[in-house]
Image (cartoon, rainbow, N blue to C red):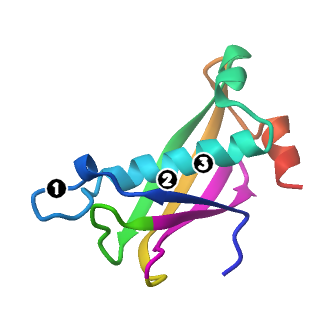
């Protein structure tokens, strides 16, 4: 599959649970970090948007866990994004690098608020998708 953005990462010891695999909640951190790095790579900063009263927030996340990651595993966090009405929908996959197995698949719906009110889009993000 072709992705708009990829980010290599590595599992840290403290992210694992008693079973020796990455705790499920950490995948949320991985996906969020990847979205932030993607936006920064395009010259957009969430903190700059916030300073202007624009907040992009998660409305919904759907995660499917496929293959567990373990301490020290290197992985590739990948994303695509499209706009659906007032939502920016991020399709995010994580692959273990050693064997290219899919570890997790997520769909993340982001909505934007301007001064606390839902808007249909933000110009910078809309431009990014053109």
> What residue does disc 1 label?
17
What residue is shown at x 40% (from left), y 64% (from top)?
A: 63
> What residue does disc 3 label?
35
- Rendered location of residue 94, percent (x, y): 48, 68
Q: Quadrant of the N terminus?
A: bottom right
Q: Main secondary structure of the magenta part?
A: strand
Q: Are marks 2 and 1 in contact (CB under 8 Å)?
A: no
Could you say whether the residue bearing mark 3 is in a helix, strand or loop? helix
> What residue does disc 2 label?
31
Q: Is residue 78 magenta?
A: yes
> Could you say which quadrant of the image residue 49 lies in?
top right
Up/down of 82 relative to 128, above or below: below
> Could you say which quadrant of the image residue 4 lies in?
bottom right
Up/down of 4 relative to 60, above or below: below
* Viewer-nearest of discs 2 and 1: 1
Gap between marks 3 and 2, in whole Å? 6 Å
Gap between marks 2 and 1, in whole Å? 19 Å
Q: How many marks?
A: 3
What residue is shown at x 49% (from left), y 57% (from top)?
A: 9
Q: Are marks 3 and 2 in contact (CB under 8 Å)?
A: yes
- Rendered location of residue 70, percent (x, y): 27, 66
Q: Residues within 10 Å of mark 2 (few under 14, many from 20)?
A: many
Q: Is residue 93 left or right of residue 29?
A: right
Q: Please state which of residues 107 and 80 is positioned toward the viewer in this rendering.
A: 80
Q: Earlier in the sequence, mark 3 or mark 1?
A: 1
What residue is shown at x 55% (from left), y 36% (from top)?
A: 57
Could you say whether the residue bearing mark 2 is in a helix, strand or loop? helix
Could you say whether the residue bearing mark 1 is in a helix, strand or loop? loop
Q: Is residue 77 magenta?
A: yes
Gap between marks 3 and 1, in whole Å? 24 Å
Q: Quadrant of the C terminus?
A: bottom right
**Magenta stretch?**
75-98
């Amino acid at each position: 599959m072709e992705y708009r953005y990829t980010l290599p990462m590595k599992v840290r010891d403290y992210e694992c649970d008693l079973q020796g695999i990455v705790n499920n909640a950490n995948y949320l951190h991985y996906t969020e970090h990847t979205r932030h790095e993607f936006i920064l790579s395009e010259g957009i900063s969430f903190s700059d948007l916030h300073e202007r009263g624009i907040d992009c927030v998660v409305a919904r996340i759907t995660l499917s866990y496929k293959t567990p990651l373990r301490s020290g595993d290197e992985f590739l966090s990948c994303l695509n994004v499209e706009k659906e009405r007032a939502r920016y929908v991020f399709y995010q996959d994580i692959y273990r690098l050693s064997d290219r197995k899919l570890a997790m698949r997520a769909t993340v719906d982001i909505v934007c608020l301007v001064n606390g009110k839902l808007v249909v889009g933000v110009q910078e993000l809309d431009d990014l998708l053109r």
